Image (cartoon, rainbow, N blue to C red):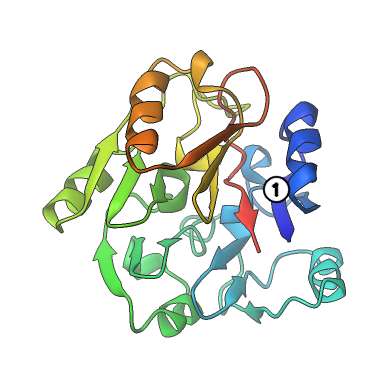
Amino acid sequence: MLIIIDKKIPGEAKEKLSAYGALLELETEGIVYPAISGHPDIFICKTPQALIVSPSLPEIFLHKLQEQQLQFIPGNQASSIQHPASVYYNAAVNNQYLVHRLEFTDPVILQNCHTLRKIPVKQAYTRCNLLLLKDDHYITSDPGIHKNLHRSGLDGIFVSPTGIILPGFLNGFIGGAMGLVNDSIFIIGSLLYYPEGSTVRKFLEDFNYRIIELYPGPLFDGGGILFI
């Protein structure tokens, strides 16, 4: 298994995560804001059909994907610091739904998700703020996303982004601190250090998720953890 992460996440988290697969640590310069320059959810969107990659992702990482014999499709629009170019690939996608500010979604993502139900939201940094779970459940740190998903018949919880670290900003977001593979939720940090950690833990345990906390410290927004 290949696990794509931001190079800037805490070293202890990387060490623990490496027991589950080979790590690909993203790092870019001069493309988007420094705080999100290595975030997987800024440059890559995993859909049920394909891995969609921003054409501005540096060549070295494309070669590393090829070395792992992973198939990917380049998107149409290059990620950059200019709005809305930093959000083209920040869609939340699973086997049933595509959730994003759809007017900003890269067309290749839309084409590859044509069979999925699309739920539009105003928050363009959607994947940063949202983790879609099985059976129409979710966790989000954006009240607008929560309202739209609830209205669309999904069942989830809203939690505050307060206490989630994103260097250079007041706080990060819950989706960026998490990754999902099968029935395991990986968290960059420990819920013991998060003000609403007990709420999150109970919600996940109610649906029989295995919670894997990657280091004993505050939740860290690394743009998600992408398992391939």
Quarter of the image holding residue 219?
top right
User: Where, quadrant-wise, is the N terminus in this rendering?
Assistant: bottom right
Against 163, residue 116 (above or below) is below
Mark 1 lies on residue: 5
Against 195, residue 76 (above or below) is below
Against 25, residue 8 (above or below) is above
Which element is circle 1 on? strand
* Observer-nearest of 181 and 159: 181
Q: Residues within 10 Å of mark 1 (few under 14, many from 20)?
A: many
User: Where, quadrant-wise, is the C terminus in this rendering?
Assistant: bottom right
Residue 69 at x, y = what percent?
80, 78
Residue under the image location 34 percent in, 40 percent down:
140
Residue under the image location 33 percent in, 76 percent down:
116
For this view, does 146 lie left or right of residue 87? left
State whether residue 202 appears in this view.
yes
Residue 216 at x, y = what percent?
65, 18
For this view, does 78 lie left or right of residue 127? right
